[in-house]
Image (tube, rainbow, N blue to C red):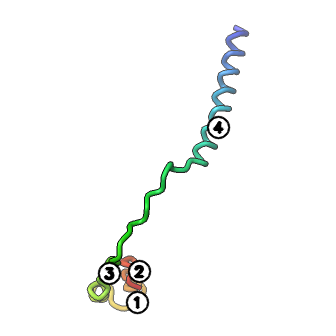
């Protein structure tokens, strides 16, 4: 019985010790490679005039209009 108690205590301590190492390893994980940014000579077109009309009709003037435009990256 005494031997079982020590074995159980040792197992609990081993699990606790390995858990801290796993947590630290997860914090310092970095991917093996970083994907390259998209290389393009053409910038994506923003249809701000269309969104301006849509947001203005939908929300009128005020903070909701500005939020609507900001969500679409037109401000």
Q: Is residue 6 above or below residue 13?
A: above
| Residue 44 x %, y % | 33, 77
- The secondary structure type at the circle numbered 3 is loop
Mark toward the viewer: 4 or 2: 4
Q: State left or right for residue 29 relative to residue 33.
A: right
| Residue 14 x %, y % | 67, 26
Q: CA distance from mark 4 to mark 2?
A: 43 Å
- Tell whether label 1 touches label 3 (CB within 8 Å): no
Image quadrant occupied by the N terminus? top right
Q: How many marks?
A: 4
| Residue 51 x %, y % | 29, 84
- Tell whether label 1 touches label 4 (CB within 8 Å): no
Q: CA distance from mark 2 to mark 1?
A: 13 Å
> Which of the pair 68/23 is nearer the observer?
23
Q: Name the residue: 69% across, 21% down.
A: 10
Q: Earlier in the sequence, mark 4 or mark 1?
A: 4
Q: Name the residue: 38% across, 66% down.
A: 38
Q: Earlier in the sequence, mark 3 or mark 1?
A: 3
Quarter assignment of residue 62: bottom left
**Residue pointed to by mark 3:** 46
Q: Earlier in the sequence, mark 4 or mark 2?
A: 4
Q: What number is the disc on residue 62?
A: 1
Q: Residues within 10 Å of mark 2 (few under 14, many from 20)?
A: few
Q: State left or right for residue 16 relative to residue 38.
A: right
């Amino acid at each position: 019985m005494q031997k079982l108690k020590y074995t159980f205590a040792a197992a609990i301590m081993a699990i606790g010790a390995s858990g801290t190492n796993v947590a630290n390893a997860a914090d310092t994980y970095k991917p093996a490679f970083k994907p390259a940014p998209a290389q393009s000579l053409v910038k994506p077109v923003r249809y701000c005039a269309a969104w301006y009309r849509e947001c203005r009709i939908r929300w009128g003037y005020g903070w909701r209009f500005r939020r609507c435009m900001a969500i679409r990256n037109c401000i």
